[in-house]
């Protein structure tokens, strides 16, 4: 057997990952359900499991089904993916490598055409330093529907994203300490910790605490169907 880079998820993992995907705190979820935060904590660490009415209401709050929470089967109902309408002429965007993405804004003015892998276009409202990145790996492939960023998708990245607090709940491109390659993940805040969250529940969230640099925000996703 080869090395398997992910672990089979259990009910507690599915509850937690779905809550984080929707940017809901344990306290907020508990309040919606009319239970204590301790109950939600116990569900997420596997001490107890929600049953009956709690399970039904939990599925509603997490925009999913009891079957998915219990067994990981059926549809993990989607959250909203915004479609950007074609209102203005598209802008040409350079697609660069995951290594180049880490220092694109610093090297942008000196970047040569030979640094660009290929070109794409975007209709999003972006700066001149916008770039594209081809997604590698399965961590952002959501097996349960949208939003999903399968391997081979092109993400359009805006490096001028404003405040870090504006990025929570958004898809970002980040570089972790010790790595030279940029990674695409959803940035979530679950007090007191920030995480880089895969959209694929088979992959674990990556806790971040000063060990990560945000390169830019994903403003559009294009897929070759």
Image (spheres, helix red, strand yellow):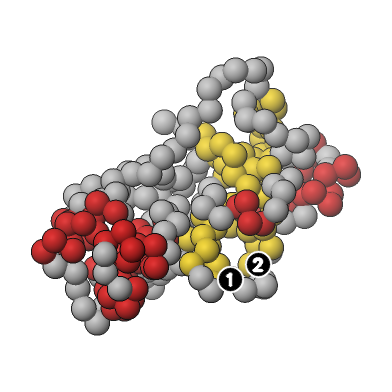
What residue is drawn where x is 77% and y is 40%? Answer: 129
Q: Are marks 2 and 1 in contact (CB under 8 Å)?
A: yes
User: Is 93 above or below relative to 7?
Assistant: above
* Res. 212 mark: 2
Q: For residue 71, say whether it is visible.
A: no
Q: For residue 23, say whether it is visible.
A: yes
Q: Quadrant of the C terminus?
A: top left
Q: Is residue 125 left or right of residue 144?
A: right
Q: Is residue 53 left or right of residue 38?
A: left
Q: Secondary structure at mark 1?
A: strand
Q: Where in the figure is residue 56, as x and y percent of width and height?
A: 17, 57
Front residue (pair 156, 29): 29
Q: Is residue 51 left or right of residue 80?
A: left
Front residue (pair 36, 114): 36
Q: Where in the figure is residue 165, as x and y percent of width and height?
A: 63, 56
Q: CA distance from mark 2 to mark 1?
A: 6 Å
């Amino acid at each position: 057997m080869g090395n398997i880079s992910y672990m089979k998820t259990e009910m507690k993992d599915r509850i937690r990952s779905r809550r984080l995907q929707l940017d809901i705190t344990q306290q907020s979820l508990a309040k919606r359900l009319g239970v204590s935060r301790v109950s939600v904590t116990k569900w997420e660490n596997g001490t107890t499991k929600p049953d009956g009415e709690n399970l039904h209401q939990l599925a509603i709050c997490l925009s999913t089904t009891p079957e998915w929470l219990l067994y990981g089967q059926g549809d993990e109902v989607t959250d909203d993916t915004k479609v950007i309408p074609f209102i203005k002429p598209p802008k040409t965007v350079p697609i660069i490598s995951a290594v180049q993405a880490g220092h694109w804004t610093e090297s942008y003015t000196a970047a040569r055409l030979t640094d660009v892998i290929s070109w794409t276009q975007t209709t999003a409202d972006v700066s001149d330093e916008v770039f594209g990145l081809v997604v590698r790996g399965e961590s952002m492939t959501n097996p349960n529907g949208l939003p999903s960023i399968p391997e081979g998708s092109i993400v359009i990245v805006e490096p001028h994203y404003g405040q870090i607090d504006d990025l929570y709940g958004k898809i970002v491109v980040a570089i972790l300490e010790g790595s030279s390659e940029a990674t695409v993940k959803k940035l979530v805040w679950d007090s007191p910790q920030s995480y880089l969250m895969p959209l694929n529940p088979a992959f674990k969230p990556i806790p971040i605490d000063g060990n990560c640099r945000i390169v830019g925000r994903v403003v559009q996703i294009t897929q070759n169907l």
